[in-house]
Amino acid sequence: MAELFSAEWMKAFGEKWNLEPELADALAKIHFNSVIGYGFEGEANPMGVITVKDGRVVSANTYEGQKLNWDLRAGRQDWHQWISRGLNMMGLSMAYMTRRLQFQVGDYTAMIKDPRMARPFVKSFSVMSKV
């Protein structure tokens, strides 16, 4: 298995993302475009990044200074737990409130209030488990 958020892992994640209707198709309906970074708390930069256009991942690789719309950080153990067990809306709220999941960039409150974004966001964690 590739190292979490490595170029190989990010590419596989992007492929799985695009195959998931509850994620890619749902975000395509709202013309979701973003550059999303993923990494570990305490590090200066995220490790991996995906670029999403109209709900679909069009590039996935390691972070190379891209301007981010979202930058998600957590501890390694937390990422592995969410990937193996999944994350639901309640778990997401708890992770955010306890700062186990940190949004270095991006508006968690606006995202969580919009079910068209919140449901796919939660779904992205189950897609991670397929990598």
Image: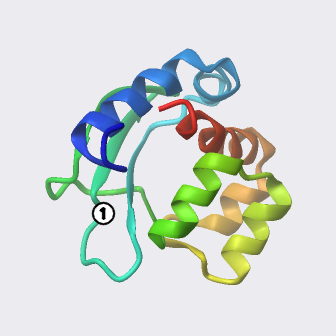
Q: Amino acid at mark 1?
A: Pro
Give the side of residue 79 with respect to residue 109, left or right: left
Across and down, in percent, residue 62 comes to 21, 47
Q: How many marks?
A: 1
Q: Is 59 situated above or below 40?
A: above
* Residue 15 seen in this snapshot: yes
Give the answer, above or below, for where 42 lies relative to 121.
below
Position of residue 10 measured from the top left corner of the image (x, y, whole percent): 34, 38
In the picture, residue 67 is in which quadrant? bottom left
Q: Position of residue 96 (x, y in %)?
A: 67, 74
User: 76 and 72: which one is in front?
Assistant: 76
Q: Is residue 91 above or below residue 32?
A: below
What residue is shown at x 68% (from left), y 38% (from top)?
Answer: 123
Q: Secondary structure at mark 1?
A: loop
**Vertical side of 60 occupied by 72: above or below:** below
Check the image and name the residue furthest to the right: 90
Name the residue at 29% across, 77% down. 43
Q: Position of residue 86 (x, y in %)?
A: 70, 48
Q: Pointer 1: what residue?
A: 46
Q: Which of the image's four quarters has the N terminus?
A: top left
Which residue is at 69% across, 72% downward? Answer: 95
At horizontal 69% and vertical 83% (from top left) the residue drawn is 98
